[in-house]
Amino acid sequence: MERTLIIIKPDAVQRGLIGQIITRFEQRGLRVIGMKLIHVTRELAEKHYAVHKERPFFAKLVDYITSSPVIVMALEGPEAIKAARTTIGSTKPFEAAAGTIRGDFALTVDYNLVHGSDSPENGVIEVANFFTDAELLPGWERSTDKWIS
Ligand code: IDP
Ligand code: MG
């Protein structure tokens, strides 16, 4: 069982795409174990994107993710990391396959709608950066689980 942090980024919230994006992950079979609307602080943004600190786009990325509210979700499932990332599509939306979130709703890397963790280790770390234990329900039983995994 893997855990991934999904962020429905400011552009997606502003464009009214929250519902359609959540639907993609629900339909895939991933189980929601935490979800909330937050305004990401600069401190949290810089921690979350620390790996990109030396990249030329870092300042713009922090401005973008802190520019207006986001939905953060913690999802669980077998192979949740790869499953979520294939549902999200390539980082550069103009290259993303049709049928993916970025391939269907986005054009440029500056506004690519969604974040998904890139490894099982980072999934655990990122979920813990955004959620307290009390905000997560990892164990809940979903009646459809036996038909999904
Ligand atoms: P990912 O979100 O698909 O995992 P990463 O390479 O981890 O992509 O980059 C993190 C985020 O940084 C991207 O989702 C995008 O918002 C932003 N980003 C990445 N590359 C560029 C770039 O070349 N220009 C501007 N923003 C970028
Ligand atoms: Mg990444």
Image (tube, rainbow, N blue to C red):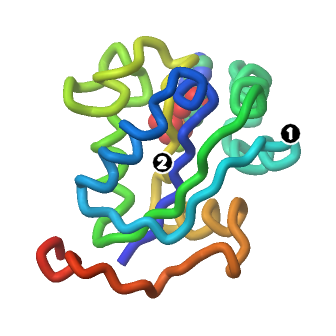
Q: Give whichever of 116, 72 is nearer the camera.
A: 72
User: Horizontal and vertical percent for residue 116?
Assistant: 48, 48
Q: Which residue is mark 1?
A: 42
Would you say the beta carbon of the disc 2 residue lies within 8 angstroms of ligand 1?
yes
Which numbered disc, 1 or 2, marks the residue that appears first in the sequence?
1
Residue lying at 16% horizontally and 71% vertically, measured from the top left: 148
Residue at 18%, 76% (x, y): give it: 149
**Residue depicted at 37% across the width and 27% down the height:** 102
115 displayed left or right of 22: right
Name which residue type carries label 1. Arg
**Image quadrant assignment for residue 52:** top right
Mark 1 C-beta closer than 8 Å to ligand 1: no
Mark 1 secondary-structure assignment: helix
Number of residues whose C-alpha sits closer than 10 Å to that of mark 1, classed few (under 14), some (14–19) or many (20 or more): some
Quarter containing ligand 1?
top right
Q: Label 2: which residue?
A: 116
Across and down, in percent, residue 1 comes to: 36, 78
Check residue 11 in the rendering and tell me which mark sits there, or answer none. Answer: none
Residue farthest to the left? 147
